[in-house]
Amino acid sequence: MAEDAAAPVPDAQLEVYARAMLALNGLVLSPADLALVVDEFRRLQDIAGPLLQHEMPDRLDLAGVFKP
Amino acid sequence: VTLAGLGAGETARRVRSREASAREVVHDTLARVAALDAKIRAFTEVTAGLARRTAERIDAVVASGGDPGPLAGVPFAVKDLYDLAGVVTRSGSKIHAERAPAQASATVVTRLMQAGAVPIGTLNMEEYAYGFHTDNPHFGRTLNPHDPARTAGGSSGGSAAAVAAGLVPLALGSDTNGSIRVPAAFCGVFGLKPTFGRLSRAGTVLFVSSFDHVGPFARSVADLAGAYDAMQGYDPADPLCVDMPCSETASRLELGIAGLRFGAPRGYFAQLLEAPCRAAVETVAGALGAKAVEIPGCIDAARAAAFVITSVEAMNERARELRTRFADFDPKTRYRFLAGALVPGPWYAKAQQFRRWFADEARRWFADADVMVLPVAPVQAPRFGETEAVVDGRSMPLRVLLGRFVQPLALLGYPIVVAPLVSDNALPTAVQLVGRPFEEEKVLRAAAHLERIGVARAPVARDFLPA
């Protein structure tokens, strides 16, 4: 198993993933639009890096917040 | 002599004392908007009829010897995501512009009107509040009153610009990742992002519910505090509105900074700043006697968490419109929304988990300080078309830079006043004054002190001064 929080994903695989995820949300895009969404996601992935690498302590109080 | 361009406090004083009528104030304000708004394009709609009817009611109350409220006759305008009864709430969107007019006004709008304020119209914004420029393809580009070649900031750019140009003394905006703070800094006006949950969001179009705040802009701290006080109060219509007593702030500004301790964070918040923005922080920190505070190196992760939460919740809010009206979105925002659909679920869960942890960390920063002095943006208002800026010798995309100091704080929901530093012939700079949760009074007192000693000021932009 890789230890990195987020491993690199080749463009072709990411496009397949993007198409599937958008379809699951009821959206079918042209290849050009899909490429732009993937570009945006790449930016988001770069920005998310520090969060994904941040080691969270194992604390119950950090679990879900809903209280009935 | 025109009554437009006066501050809120002075306007209310004149109306309450019968030196002026609310109708005269509205007449002069509408004339000023008609004459000057074309220079900045802040308004998306002027509600002249509603304003005149409201003013007539206030004048009738004054004539009958009743109390017209602390904001009697004060003109205000709202970011175009607040419901105004009888007006279409566009939210910067061509799609929302086709909706029916709002049946009722947003809670905070109603409260301002109950305090005597008069709604003048709706103000331009980024489409669905997603961006820092207010360069809207459907309703136009709002220009900075201090330099029309530059952005007013966003997403509440119309609100900040209308106040900076003296078109209205008060405006309402919203802040998710900095959308009150950045335009307040770029336009040189005071802005308040209250504690998350302090003011009701009922009757506003949500962008990212986990972070959405509503708040006012003004040209003085007293006006800012007066508007905030009028809007306070629990509202069961917003499930995140906190049920706690109101805490009046305007009458406590005169306490000054006695007993307050100030901090100025090092590390992340002191890196990647243009010289004027760094100078603003140093000037304010010096004036307040702020002590250096070490901040742990987790701020990049905080910003990342804010991005992840924003992407997912924004996509969720607009999923239906994206499915049915994809082509009608601003091309700048539609792909940002859709990228949120690609975020793996565990990233979102971790971002919310990090938020809890980060809130615990942040409480420690305030162990020896009541108010922190932080930069707002790393740069002053950029020119339209600029995509990069050089800070600390590094060229960086503005899209990455503009939220650098405001977005990490979105996670915390702490109260923040933006205090502007405006000098002749220079673009505004500003600082964030950050307090502990529900301690709006302290950040407002700090801002009022800075205003009193002449460090912070928010005059009407030079080209808009009344003749």
Image (cartoon, coloured by chain):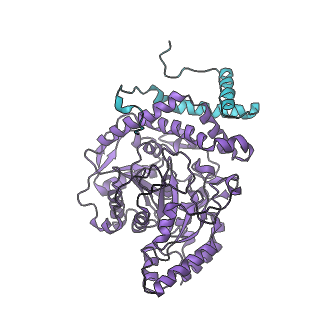
Q: Is residue A46 above or below residue B210?
A: above
As drawn, the residue found furthest toward the front would be: A68
Q: Camera-side residue: B327 or B162?
A: B327
Who's purple, chain-wise? B
Task: Decide if residue B25 is on the left or right side of residue B361.
Answer: right
Q: Is residue B76 above or below residue A60?
A: below
Q: Quadrant of residue B361?
A: top left
Q: Quadrant of residue B31?
A: bottom right
Q: Could you tell me which residue is drawn at 67 percent across and 32 percent down?
A: A22
Who's cyan, chain-wise? A
Q: Could you tell me which residue is drawn at 58 percent across and 64 percent down?
A: B84
Q: Is residue B211 above or below residue B352?
A: below
Quarter of the picture containing the C terminus of chain B is bottom right
Task: Decide if residue B90 is on the left or right side of residue B413.
Answer: right
Can residue B19 be seen here? no
| Image location (x, y in percent) of residue A20 | 68, 26
Q: Could you tell me which residue is drawn at 29 percent across and 51 percent down?
A: B370
| Image location (x, y in percent) of residue B400 | 54, 40
| Image location (x, y in percent) of residue B256 | 28, 64
As drawn, the residue found furthest toward the top would be: A1
